[in-house]
Amino acid sequence: MSAVVEPPAGTAGVDRPYCAWCGAARAQGDHAACDRRLATVDPPRHCPLCARRMVVQVDPMGWTARCSRHGESAGTNGFA
């Protein structure tokens, strides 16, 4: 299953330099395990634009994640 993710408003086409799962710079290390988790079972925990921890809400239909600087994103990871 692949994640359906709606990026935060106003960030289309913006480079995402940080891993949304662990918050580390994408250029440092291997993030294949993080990408697998995000694609199958877990919502993002860190903003991919600034690496801040996000407020995450999971419900039976999917999830929403809110960054204090970049807004809200939403998606489903096999919940629907």
Image: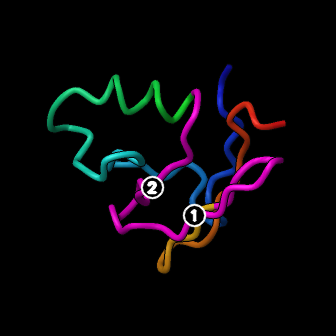
* Residue at the image point whose x is 23% and y is 49% from the top: 24
* Residue at the image point whose x is 50% and y is 50% from the top: 44
Magenta-colored stretch includes residue 41: yes
Farthest residue, direction bottom: 68
Residue 27 in the image: above or below residue 36: below
Element class at badge 1: strand
Magenta-colored stretch includes residue 49: yes
Q: Kindly identify which residue carries mark 1.
A: 56
Q: Amino acid at mark 1?
A: Val
Q: Amino acid at mark 2?
A: Arg
Q: Kindly identify which residue carries mark 2.
A: 45
In front: 9, or 74? 74
Element class at badge 2: loop
Residue 16 in the image: above or below residue 38: below
Coordinates of residue 37 in the picture (x, y in percent): 47, 31
Indicate the quadrant where residue 34 lies: top left
Q: Is residue 80 left or right of residue 22?
A: right
